[in-house]
Image (cartoon, rainbow, N blue to C red):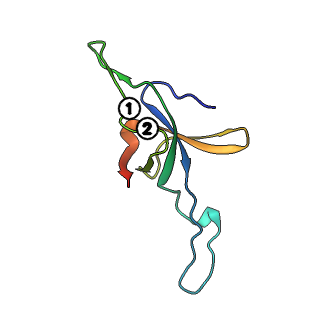
Amino acid sequence: MLKPLGDRVVLKAQENEEQTVGGIVLASNAKDKPTTGEVVAVGEGRMLDNGTKVPVSVKKGDKVLFDKYAGNEVEYEGQKYLVVHEKDLVAVLD
């Protein structure tokens, strides 16, 4: 599995099929990039200037909301993931 470094978080973006009122299903390239995902792995945290390590505030399994154009898409063992910095996470969904 991917192991993120520092304050990075690996997400599995949740794709939602979108349908218009008229019943037309939009192609994936016509839709906006997903902004919710599930945390798959987290790094050890961010190092401050004084040497203190601040742990990441999310954990594996959390459902999160992230910035629309955040992170880098990677493919690992046939599965697509998104690697983002903790600062790109907006909220944890309940």
Give the vertical position of 80 relative to 53 (above or below): below
Q: Position of residue 41 (x, y in %)?
A: 52, 35
Give the vertical position of 84 relative to 63 (above or below): above
Query: Element at badge 1?
Result: loop
Q: Position of residue 53 (x, y in %)?
A: 33, 19
Residue lying at 41% horizontally and 49% vertically, measured from the top left: 67
Identify residue type, mark 2.
Answer: Lys
Identify residue type, mark 1.
Answer: Val
Looking at the picture, tell me which residue is in the foreground, 51 or 33: 51
Residue at the bottom extreme of this rendering: 22
Label count reads: 2
Q: Position of residue 92 (x, y in %)?
A: 37, 49
Looking at the picture, tell me which residue is in the foreground, 71 or 15: 15
Q: Which mark is residue 17?
A: none
Look at mark 1 in the image and give the residue it sits on: 56
Alpha carbon of mark 1 to alpha carbon of mark 2: how far?
A: 8 Å
Look at mark 2 in the image and give the residue it sits on: 59
Tag 1 near tag 2, CB within 8 Å: yes
Residue lying at 47% horizontally and 49% vertically, measured from the top left: 69
